[in-house]
């Protein structure tokens, strides 16, 4: 009985850490002034001369969506700026469409070394001959909202550190309940929690899309990797080196959730497996460096990274609570463990409710979103079982299937590189 009580106590403590981190981040974002959280297009006083900027857009078979991305970028660029599309292992008209719209296009062919990291490294080497002051990375299926490039460039150049824009996913025109819950989870992760950290004066993790870097900081960094969450690793490495990322709430980049269930499953699997792998390997490193360097910001990054995807956190906590109840009913273990686990579950629910209440209008999330969270969690069981069996840490480098008209089948579904 003593051993069982010890393990139940340990489980309660292990769940308490990510639960409190999530709650503190959400409550900080909730109590912040409205102008600080919801006004994503607010302006700041900028320098008279804007930093020379290069915008890199890595693209793999994005002919159906890249035109919207380029059209949202071009009005924000000045004569001194560069817009470079890296057509990476493309078998469709991505390069042609981009050139016709006025972007500079470089093409890369390497079937063995596939992934966003390799594409970005290729783009970085291209702009070395005419280096900018600031480099901004934008995904090829995104809408870059007005003022975003100017704000990112100014802040990266002034603060001399990476700047992460607010990065959201919107539901498609024909949306299922899973789309709404997935959009809510993305909202909590990419807006609410980073905003809470910013209110507390802490840095955030990089998100891969809408990232800005001072050229002097990024020019010597090797980006050539097949890591599926290379942005998280890059942000951690820079933070340890003394350059943690800052969130720009006034800069906004939005994308759309894929309509096809298979495509959405592949994207979630790639990201969540990569995130979990990063959490397991990088949290101890961040904790060690926070002690060695006596830096609170690294400790907060470690705690933030320790929070698993919300669906997994709820799934594990519910399982632990059921197990504790069964032990109580069968062998007489104290009710206190079930009670504390239940309180932690309530804290998570309150955190999500606060996030939905204040930020639901940002991407138009109806009330039914909250009602379908249990179904959404159940639908992701397979992803987590696959992580235990064989985690996916790299970009999917499976061969591309092309139809006779040259359009990638996966591209039709909205498959990202």
Image: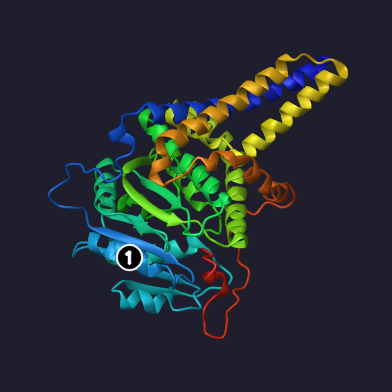
Q: Position of residue 27 (x, y in %)?
A: 44, 27
* Depth order, front residue of 193/54: 193
Specify the quadrant of the image occupied by residue 205.
top left
Q: Residue at x 39, y 65 (%)?
A: 123
State whether residue 149 appears in this view: yes
Quadrant in the picture for the N terminus? top right
Q: Which residue is mark 1?
A: 127
Q: Position of residue 151 (x, y in %)?
A: 26, 48
Farthest-out residue, bottom: 404
Using residue 38 as the reference point, say whether residue 318 is left or right of it: right
State whether residue 293 appears in this view: no
Farthest-out residue, left: 48
Specify the quadrant of the image occupied by residue 79.
bottom left
Q: Position of residue 31 (x, y in %)?
A: 37, 26
* Depth order, front residue of 351/54: 351
Using residue 202 as the reference point, say whether residue 342 is left or right of it: right
Specify the quadrant of the image occupied by residue 345.
top right
Q: Residue at x 36, y 30 (%)?
A: 199
């Amino acid at each position: 009985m003593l051993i069982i009580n010890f393990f139940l106590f340990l489980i309660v403590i292990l769940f308490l850490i990510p639960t409190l981190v999530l709650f503190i981040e959400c409550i900080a974002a909730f109590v912040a002034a409205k102008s600080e959280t919801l006004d994503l297009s607010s302006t700041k006083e900028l320098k008279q001369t804007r930093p020379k900027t290069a915008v890199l857009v890595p693209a793999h078979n994005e002919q159906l969506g890249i035109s919207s991305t380029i059209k949202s970028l071009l009005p924000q660029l000045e004569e001194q700026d560069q817009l470079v599309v890296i057509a990476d292992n493309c078998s469709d008209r991505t390069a042609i469409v981009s050139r016709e719209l006025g972007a500079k296009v470089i093409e890369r062919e390497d079937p063995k070394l596939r992934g966003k990291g390799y594409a970005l490294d290729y783009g970085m080497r291209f702009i070395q001959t005419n280096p900018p002051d600031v480099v901004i990375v934008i995904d090829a299926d995104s809408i870059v909202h007005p003022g975003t490039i100017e704000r990112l460039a100014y802040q990266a150049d002034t603060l001399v550190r990476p700047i992460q824009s607010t990065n959201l996913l919107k539901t498609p025109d024909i949306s299922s309940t899973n789309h709404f819950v997935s959009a809510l989870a993305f909202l909590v992760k990419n807006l609410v929690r980073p905003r809470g950290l910013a209110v507390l004066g802490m840095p955030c993790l990089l998100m891969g899309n809408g990232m800005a870097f001072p050229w002097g900081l990024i020019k010597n960094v090797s980006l050539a990797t097949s890591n599926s969450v290379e942005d998280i690793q890059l942000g951690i490495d820079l933070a340890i080196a003394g350059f943690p990322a800052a969130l720009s709430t006034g800069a906004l980049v939005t994308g759309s959730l894929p309509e096809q269930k298979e495509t959405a499953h592949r994207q979630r699997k790639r990201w969540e497996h990569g995130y979990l792998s990063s959490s397991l390997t990088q949290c101890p490193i961040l904790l060690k460096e926070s002690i060695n360097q006596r830096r609170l910001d690294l400790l907060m990054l470690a705690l933030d990274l320790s929070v698993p995807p919300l669906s997994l956190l709820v799934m594990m906590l519910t399982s632990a609570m059921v197990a504790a109840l069964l032990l109580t009913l069968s062998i007489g273990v104290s009710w206190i463990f079930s009670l504390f686990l239940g309180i932690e579950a309530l804290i998570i629910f309150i955190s999500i409710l606060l996030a939905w209440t204040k930020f639901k209008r940002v991407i138009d999330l109806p009330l039914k979103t909250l009602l379908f969270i249990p179904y959404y969690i159940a639908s992701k069981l397979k992803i987590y079982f696959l992580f235990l069996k064989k985690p996916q840490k790299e970009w999917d480098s499976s061969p591309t299937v092309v139809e006779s008209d040259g359009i990638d089948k996966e591209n039709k579904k909205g498959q990202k590189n």
